[in-house]
Amino acid sequence: MTALKAGATIGILGGGQLGRMLGSAAAALGFDISIYCPEEDCPAARVAAQHTIGAYTDTDALIAWAKTCDAITYEFENVPVEAAQALISAGALVRPGAKPLEVSQDRIVEKTFLRDCGIQTADFAQIDTAADVAGPIEQFGGEGILKTRRDGYDGKGQARLELGDDYEAAHKALKHAPCILEAMVPFEFEVSVIVARDRAGESICFDIPRNEHVNGILKRSVVPSDLSADVAERAGDAAKALADALDYVGVLALEFFVLSDGTLLANEFAPRVHNSGHWTPEACATGQFEQHMRAVAGWPLGPVTRYHDVEMLNLLGEEALVPPEVLAADGILTLYGKRDAKPGRKMGHLVRRRS
Amino acid sequence: MTALKAGATIGILGGGQLGRMLGSAAAALGFDISIYCPEEDCPAARVAAQHTIGAYTDTDALIAWAKTCDAITYEFENVPVEAAQALISAGALVRPGAKPLEVSQDRIVEKTFLRDCGIQTADFAQIDTAADVAGPIEQFGGEGILKTRRDGYDGKGQARLELGDDYEAAHKALKHAPCILEAMVPFEFEVSVIVARDRAGESICFDIPRNEHVNGILKRSVVPSDLSADVAERAGDAAKALADALDYVGVLALEFFVLSDGTLLANEFAPRVHNSGHWTPEACATGQFEQHMRAVAGWPLGPVTRYHDVEMLNLLGEEALVPPEVLAADGILTLYGKRDAKPGRKMGHLVRRRS
């Protein structure tokens, strides 16, 4: 495929805030946006030219929708792999493809893939039954985190275990789902690399944010991260190696734990634009949403020059019930148009320039 | 009215590129957008939650639409004054109101209003018939520009006249419309002030761009303008005085001719966001579209800190047929989603950082 023309339609699987921000960025480039998701009144559809309501498992509906799109991308990593594969088999151009979904949806597959790319991770073990915990937890120094292999996000589907805990009860609380036990990592702080890769295989990384989580949910990202140049370069190279190995086209985010000696341990990656990159549209020549859409369209990537130091604060649940005019006085405000401010729900974010 | 809440619906009269960019900016603040315009497939509706197709003269349709909106604004200055008045009479919150339309739609009323605000303009005379030209053109030094009082834009509806020309033929070419004769101004260059005023009466100006026109159409805006601080301050004060006199809420643009001695002669104003401010989203903490929507929502204005020097180039007609991936390699590209690239039509713009 050559590059998409202005006026082409880009389809997005998923209707959340990432789809909303991707859609607005693509509209600024002259594209029409078509959202496919199961929800009727979703944040993304309200800024899109078209909206198809359907299940991700309804292959016929997906393929009919795909015929109205010139290219398709996704805004969340739990799109069924089969949906992406069906679209590709039907001739649709899906960027970044089905493979990144397949790899990122299962923590064992993901960590194995990262290691195969030469990217270091914490130690981990496959847990099918509670009896599988005892060996690895001793090996990991007497503690670990039990996580479901699939469908966990924002700290959900996790339990911290110590030697001698009731492993069966912990596994039962996770509905006896297939799990992974990960060794605890004595990290100093967390960072993420947001990298874009175009169809020609060229990659470019945004400056690396340092990320602060509260209750497993991202609360704040700060740039610069104060990583040494050497460590930052290693992090960027790892993200590029991952993107290359996936033959990735678009933006992905690779999260790292940073140890006191500068060791980087990859935690997980997201095959999409990322919350820790929400400061990029305000602080950089090209934001992550535009960057992703440029790659999807087959356009060259934009420059990622950062104009100033910056922090991004997530507005979670009731934090977004502060009157918006008060929030807006305190930084550059983005709200996602979600109707209900459930506890912990990502409702918007604030970007602040740091002097 | 207190400030609009997140999730409120803002209605926009007009479906062009300004509505599109206003709509995307408002969506980022958490608002839903509802477009009212006569065209079925317009640039703005494709990024809006709602679209009502109707004539600006259909008062019943307008009022029915207004009932679905929490506030209403407009994206072009030729919305009939009667439409705005009917909406206001029906209880709708219309910002910036009907008065700015009334004043800006007629060049005689506009220049008189500017002068009443203490803002200097070129000399002008009212032309109802060709016979009215002879006196003023002599008084203006033997030349002048005949313009229709209403409905001119981008250099349309104008004719340059010299002493002894066939005034009747010129007036006939303008369909004998009520006209104004304006004295020629020996200006060095043109600038515009883009000012925002909030509901509390606070005003804030963006840095002033220098504007270059080709065939009466804006081609390039450059910031900084190289105006002296003193002249820039006078220009800003004039724009604020105009906004105050109109009890304006939102963004307006006031255009000036700059003479070699620093004299500023106001040309016209637009009661809306302005083409010469299209660099602001890329180069400033708050862009003009967000700024307008903040004012319309009753929110505080945002900071207009400019991060770097910048130029904005309009893409007119066939200039936008260059493949967008080529354009995008040359600056930050915005395309308006217009289906046909008619000659001279504003199709998009490029913003370039200047080192």
Image (tube, coloured by chain):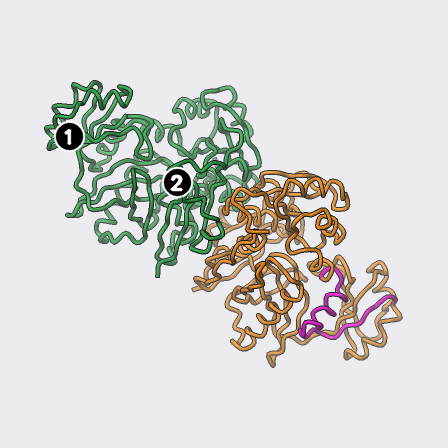
Chain colours: A green, B orange
The kind of residue tagged 1 is: Glu
The residue nearer to you, when weighing B152 against A204, is B152
* CA neighbours of label 1 inside 10 A, class few (<14), some (14 to 19), many (20+): some
* Label of residue A273 in the image: 2
Residue A200 in view in this figure: no
Q: Does the magenta stretch include residue B105?
A: yes
Number of numbered discs overlaid on the protein picture: 2
The residue nearer to you, when weighing A303 against B29, is B29
Q: In this view, does B318 lie above or below B183?
A: above
Q: In this view, does B219 lie above or below A266?
A: below
Residue at figure coordinates x 78%, y 62% from the top left? B148
Residue A245 x/y as whole percent: 30, 34
Q: In which quarter of the image is residue A133?
A: top left
Would residue B261 appear left or right of B286 to someone viewing this image?
Answer: right
Residue B84 x/y as whole percent: 72, 51
Residue B119 x/y as whole percent: 66, 73
The kind of residue tagged 2 is: Val
Residue at figure coordinates x 16%, y 41% from the top left? A186
Chain at tag 2:
A
Residue B309 x/y as whole percent: 46, 64
Pair 1/2: label in front: 1
Q: CB of mark 1 within 8 Å of CB of mark 2? A: no
* Label of residue B343 in the image: none
Residue B309 in view in this figure: yes
| Residue denoted by label 1 | A162
Chain at tag 1:
A
Name the quarter where the C terminus of chain A is drawn: bottom left
* CA neighbours of label 2 inside 10 A, class few (<14), some (14 to 19), many (20+): many
Which residues make up the magenta segment? B104-129
Residue at figure coordinates x 12%, y 28% from the top left? A163
Q: Quadrant of residue A183?
A: top left
